[in-house]
Amino acid sequence: MRQKAIIFIKKDAYANILQAIIRVISETIEWPIRIQLVDHDTFQRFEKDGIYLTSTTTANHVHNGRVQKVDVTQSALKRLLEPFKPLIAKEVSIIGYNDLTEVLFDDLCAQNVRHIHVFCEQGGSMTHSNDQIIYHELNEWKTIQTDFFIQTQAVELGAMQNEAVQAHLRTYQGISDLSRMIARPTWLGDVPFQNQLDWLIHLTIAQTEVYLNHRIQKPLRDKICHELIDADPANDSIFLVGLPAVGKSSVGTQLAKQLNYHFVDLDKEMIKRTGLSITQLYDQDEQAYRDLESELLREYGRLKRTVVSTGNGVVLRKENRDYLARSFVIHLDRPQKLMNYGVSTRNRPLLRGNPGVIKKMRRERAFYYYSISNCRVMNYKRLRTAQILTHLMKRRNDMHAYMREALSQLR
């Protein structure tokens, strides 16, 4: 079992948004993270001492835990840029010159950006051996158009509320303030918050990786970003994925009742469409079976407020995984010992004559389920599991409302 972690967040205008981001990260990567808000003075002491995270075996005994002192700067910045790769042939502005700037030089040059324009107070007298890197005076920052705008140092950039300055900032594909360990780009004024939120999410993911010493795979990073930016929890359909006999249909039926959603079982819909059993469909033409499965996944996935129980092999196709990556997905599972007996092979062609195949399927498909799911829930009793999922959906709705309120206060 993974060790619980506690992440401290300073109480300020961004605290509520950071809490929401970290909660989504925690559920998606299945790592228990407790968030503790601290006042300004305490957080300053933590920053001075290099304390950003404590890990403890029980979340209720923080002070008995092991204190980790971590240097997140270089590792987090290198990871931060990964979602934006490749930046080949892009123009990048960097405001300020310090150790962070040097880290960015290495990473951006490795990506073969066209030019890195560095704006700093002594820029007019500075040169670099790499002709990709061009120095400028600080007051020239808004005269040169680039694709990405990164601030690495808290320097005065002039009248940020000036309409011409604001119009210039809106032209960037990406904007980030890296002058703090966790970005707080308050200087952006009326710039649309979407760009700020994207960068804040990616930076928080990168820092969480460093804190936990755990690499978050790209599919999971994409899931986190989709949930925080594009999800509509009041209307989104809910997809259940998992191995055979984990209870997707029975739990899904109960969950739909408790949420007042529609319920769709893709296997039953395939039987209705064709008049054939799942076994007959599979035996006749596996390719046609998978094609129909993919078609129905998209057809019913477009419905609002619907619980969709999928076939266990839906994750085998990349196009299906890509589709589910942009949806809210619950990975339903059961302990292997409960699946070693009493599993019916009716309408489960892959299990015929080989009941031990479930163990093999678990090994082969575990990462697929993990990479497309927002959370994983163990099913022991269907009614209890449905109640747990109903509570999870309520918490999700509350979290989104909480974050929307926080965003509205920053805009």
Image: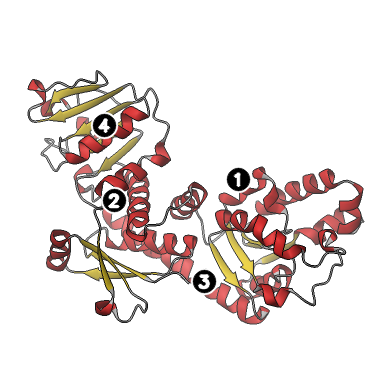
Q: Which residue is mark 3?
A: 392
- Counting residues from the start of the chain, the first of labels 4 and 1 encountered is 4
Q: Residues within 10 Å of mark 2 (few under 14, many from 20)?
A: few
Q: Which residue is mark 2?
A: 411
Q: Secondary structure at mark 1?
A: helix
Disc 1 versus disc 3: nearer the observer: 1
How far from the left and from the top, in percent, is residue 409? 28, 57
Q: Kindly check if marks 4 and 3 are in contact, taking CB atoms under 8 A apart as contact.
A: no
Q: Which residue is mark 4?
A: 105
Q: Which residue is mark 1?
A: 322
Q: Is residue 302 left or right of residue 186?
A: right
- At x 48% / y 47%, what residue is drawn? 218
Q: Kindly check if marks 1 and 2 are in contact, taking CB atoms under 8 A apart as contact.
A: no
- At x 43% / y 53%, what residue is drawn? 215
Disc 4 versus disc 1: nearer the observer: 4
Kindly report the distance in space between the C-alpha atoms of the residues bearing marks 2 and 3.
29 Å
Kindly report the distance in space between the C-alpha atoms of the residues bearing marks 1 and 3.
24 Å
| Depth order, front residue of 217/356 | 356
Q: Is residue 185 left or right of residue 304?
A: left
